[in-house]
Amino acid sequence: MDTRRLPHLVELDRLGSMRAVAEALGTSTSVVSQQIAALGREVGAPLVEPDGRRVRLTPAGRRLAEHGRGILTAVDAARADLDPAAEPAGRVRVAGFASAVRRSLMPIVADAAVRHPALRLTVLEHEPAEALALLEADAVDLALVYDYDLAPAAPLPATLRAGRRLWETRWGLGVPDEGSVPDGPTTSAEVLAAYAGRTWIGNSRNTADEEVLRLLASRAGFELRITHEADSLDLVDDLVVAGLGVGLLPLERPARPGVRVLDLPDPPVRLRARPVVRRGRESWPPLAAVLRALG
């Protein structure tokens, strides 16, 4: 059924004559008659019947006119909702890793609530692979993901598109604060080599940390032994303090007592955060508002 024909039927139900409908829609009575007849053929039932010199709606015509009002209202609402110039309204589902949620998303929540009262955010904490899988399945609208410059992420599927980088941060090697550090290491590989005999901590939900560590260990000429995996930075701290291993930690994050984060100077280890959306969705007003706020 071509919904573009519905206004002719709805207006006939409201105004009662083909001539009045033609005047209201800026067309001719013959066009009104043709559109209603075509609509009747599409639904398989006559919609009008003679009533003296005029016509009136059949029971099927009246019923379809009732549905038509609701359909046309829904179409208008959908157009307004998808209009890039429309006021953002609706729920934006965001899946992202914890640091991005804290650093990028949380600061914009209060402002977004003031600027766009009808906009709602749903936050799901997920590592990049998990967030991208949800985005591909259309279970979320926005993924906040990361990779390392030393372990670049695989190319995105054709259905997804990455936005510009949100921020990047340097990472170092978290080790027990034992009052001494390796003397004058000039490369990241030399820093790792000083702890070659230790056990190592990887990420339980993302392989990128392990890829970076193995790359640097290979340059240092040893094979590291990952015995622990943790998703929480606080848990990495606990494992380091307990002497159970060493692993990557952000340099800019305040170190807890008992932990020292050593600089990895050459090559530096940089974590890069970026937003990812489904192609073609960027202009949806609620999502566009969130992307603008993220910068």
Image: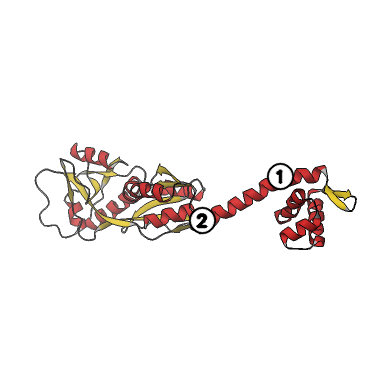
Q: Nearer the viewer, residue 50 or 274?
A: 50
* Residue at 70 percent of width and 53 percent of height: 3
Q: Nearer the viewer, residue 283 or 204?
A: 283
Q: Amino acid at mark 1?
A: His
The residue sitting at the right extreme is: 52
* Residue at 15 percent of width and 40 percent of height: 258
> How far apart are the two marked residues, 1 and 2, measured between alpha carbons?
26 Å
Badge 1, how many Cα within 10 Å: few under 14, some, many 20+?
few
Residue 134: give x, y in percent of width and height. Answer: 47, 46
Identify the disc placed on residue 118.
Answer: none
Residue 266: give x, y in percent of width and height. Answer: 21, 61
Q: Can I make out residue 1 in this image?
A: no
Q: Is residue 50 left or right of residue 94?
A: right
* Residue at 20 percent of width and 40 percent of height: 240
Of labels 1 and 2, earlier in sequence is 1
Residue 163: give x, y in percent of width and height. Answer: 41, 59
Residue that mark 2 sits on: 86
Residue that mark 1 sits on: 67
Kindly check if marks 1 and 2 are in contact, taking CB atoms under 8 A apart as contact: no
The residue sitting at the bottom extreme is: 27
Q: Is residue 259 left or right of residue 141?
A: left
